Amino acid sequence: MSFSAVCCEIFERATSDYHIENRVDASVNNPYEPESIDCYLYLKNWIDAVQWHLEDIIRNPEVDPVEALAIKRRIDKSNQDRTDLVERIDGYFLNACKDVQTAPAATVNTESPAWAVDRLSILVLKLYHMHQETVRPDASPAHRDACLRKLAVLQEQKEDLSAALDQLLNDIEQGRKYMKVYKQMKMYNDPALNPVLYGKK
């Protein structure tokens, strides 16, 4: 099974598991061995699923402003957790390919493998939710038809991204490309770099 197929299988399981309770505060019961790549992938999609629903909640025009601020801060933390986990997944790829002999003409890719994995996780969630729209009993036929067309586009995107991810990993394993990972520097989360925060000292 290709790596992208493993990702999709785990992401679909996590998405399905999340929607059993369908609550942003539901406990995650990760079925995979701790610190394994499968464990990281499951957790990655769970974080994305929770954040997806937090983004829905905060867009309710009737949401209490105090609650909205708490949700916004929770989304900020979720974004940081997501970024940290992506970097951990890239660490897995770096370790797996540490002994690869890079070809002299090897090039670096526009994004690291784990950021492609991140996009694949979001696509699995989009596919799940778009499918829900196609079977929504209170939706009009026009709405369902429009969502079916969007669903087909999302499926094509998933197939293209999966193929591109597998090709990238193969190129890295064969030395045709090499990984160069930059740590994400989210300045707004850092009290030493956000002027609003360090200005309060």
Image (cartoon, rainbow, N blue to C red):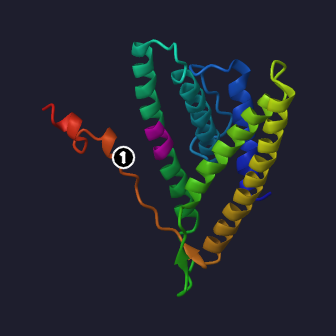
Q: The N terminus appears in which quarter of the rendering?
A: bottom right
Badge 1 marks a residue whose secondary structure is loop
**What percent of the width, then of the height, locates residue 23?**
62, 19
Name the residue at 72% across, 57% down: 162
Write the start and end of the magenta stretch as one range: 79-84
Q: Is 72 left, or right, of 36 in this rendering?
A: left
Name the magenta segment's main secondary structure. helix
Q: Is residue 187 magenta?
A: no
**What percent of the width, then of the height, locates residue 187?**
31, 46
Name the residue at 64% across, 33% down: 30
Is any atom of residue 3 visible in this view?
no
Task: Identify the residue under disc 1.
Answer: 186
Q: Quadrant of residue 109?
A: bottom right
Q: Nearer the viewer, residue 97 or 70?
A: 70
**What percent of the width, then of the height, locates residue 189?**
33, 39
Q: Residue furthest left?
A: 201
Name the residue at 58% across, 26% down: 56
Q: Amino acid at mark 1?
A: Lys
Q: Is 141 left, or right, of 90 in this rendering?
A: right
Is any atom of residue 171 visible in this view?
yes
